[in-house]
Image: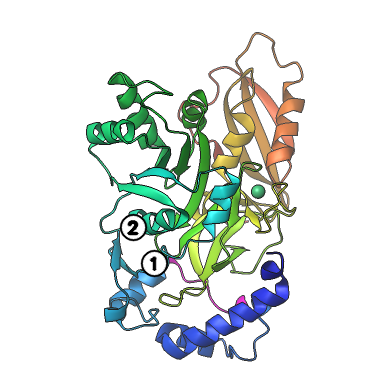
Amino acid sequence: MNNEWSAAARDTRLREHLAYAYARAPAVRALLDEAALDPKTMRGLADLAALPVTSKDDLLRRQAEDPPFGGFCAVPVEDVGRVYVSPGPIYEPAGVWENADWMQDILAANGVPRRGRALISFSYHLVPAGLGLDDMLRRYGLAVVPAGIGNTDVQAQVLCDLGVEVFCGTPSFLVTLMERAEAKGYRWGQELRLRYAIIGAEAFTTALKTEMARRDLAVVQTYGTADVGLLGASCPAGDGFHLSDQAVVEIVDPDNGQPLDPGEIGEVVVTPFSPTYPLVRFGTGDLAALQAEPCPCGLASPVLSRLAGRVGEAVKVRGMFLHPIQVDAALDAIDGIGRYQVSVRRAGLRDELVVQVEIAGDNGEDGLPELVEKRAREIWRVRPDRVETVSSGTLPEGGKVLVDERPWDG
Ligand SMILES: [Zn+2]
């Protein structure tokens, strides 16, 4: 297992994959030729950064110019089996989402039974999530109800009639479904036997987490995109996503596409080892970091941190990205503060990070600035210069939590 993740093994696999894609996908050939990169003689991961990042917009444009797959499909369209359609419209040949057997070890680590009943409420039409996960869960050993989206009453009844143990879908729909089943009089431990939730495609908020914990569900969070498939899933030990071995996942500086060190937040850029749809350095637009330390759960795969937001919303402060989600993560749960706002200003040549918090509790500001600073240093990669306390009602209601006040002209 460890060998597979060694630098040498990954380099070899990348070279072989790119040589395959170069021979079959005209867009991959063009990208490598432009960078004067020969897949047979390239070093491997170290040379990948010579290739440009292809954004979703780039892909949409390439597909319009060279339909249906923009020159990225490595097999004739008649051989792909299925063609998925994502909003855009943007087309994806099958074979990326279906390639998710790496997730079986992670499901086992989460205690998901090899024999059991699952209900999938991701969409089964147009987009790849429903069918892709359906294939994987059936191979894992589960009997699957292909429920798709909607029909909440029917799904609630099916959940109970069949004694479904594993739910797969969005966390918000799961809460709706459980509440509907409870309202119909179904009882936990009797008809309601749900124990595991494989969730994705939306934020897993504190409120949703509370609903899952209240019903004692074990949650497996997944991360993926329509274009490059399922990329990671969470284990019981950590908060991030163990990565798929079916792709190279890089974290890069969104400004120049260059790889960043573990722990640094940047854009998630993916090169899937797909024999049908070998996109190269696809830019997801998501921000995250690779964890520097191996996961205590013992799985060998590297771990991607929880997502820190989207590229366009982040602000670069002293060379490090800060995102509104990180601001909330640090400040939201602190007792005794009301609204808060973080501003990036310019002091001479230097970026200055100022945190303003409203005092909401009766305890005044005793120790509050120190606590705010401590939380910020734990969660952000950049430390605040100042924490200012202001009285309740000073900061605008519904205002941005992160503002960039630096003048554009320096
Ligand atoms: Zn783990």
- For numbered disc 1, what is the local secondary structure? helix
Q: Nearer the viewer, residue 401 or 109?
A: 109
Determine which quarter of the picture holds residue 385.
top right
Q: Quadrant of the N terminus?
A: bottom right
| Whole-percent x, y for residue 168 in the image | 40, 44
Which of the numbered marks, if any, corresponds to residue 131? 2
Q: How many marks?
A: 2
Left/right placement of residue 192 relative to residue 110 reads left
Residue for point 35% across, 76% down? 62
Using the image, determine if residue 349 lies above or below residue 278. Answer: above
- For numbered disc 2, what is the local secondary structure? helix
Any atom of ligand 1 within 8 Å of the CB at mark 2? Answer: no
Left/right placement of residue 403 relative to residue 73 reads right
Q: Nearer the viewer, residue 329 or 321?
A: 329
Q: Which residues are magenta?
A: 48-57
Which of the numbered marks, if any, corresponds to residue 114? none
Q: Quadrant of the C terminus?
A: bottom right
| Whole-percent x, y for residue 404 in the image | 57, 45
For the residues labelled 2 and 1, the Cα–Cα distance comes to: 25 Å
Read off the residue under disc 1. 57
| Whole-percent x, y for residue 205 in the image | 49, 34
Question: Label 1 sits on what residue type?
Answer: Asp
- Is residue 375 in view? yes
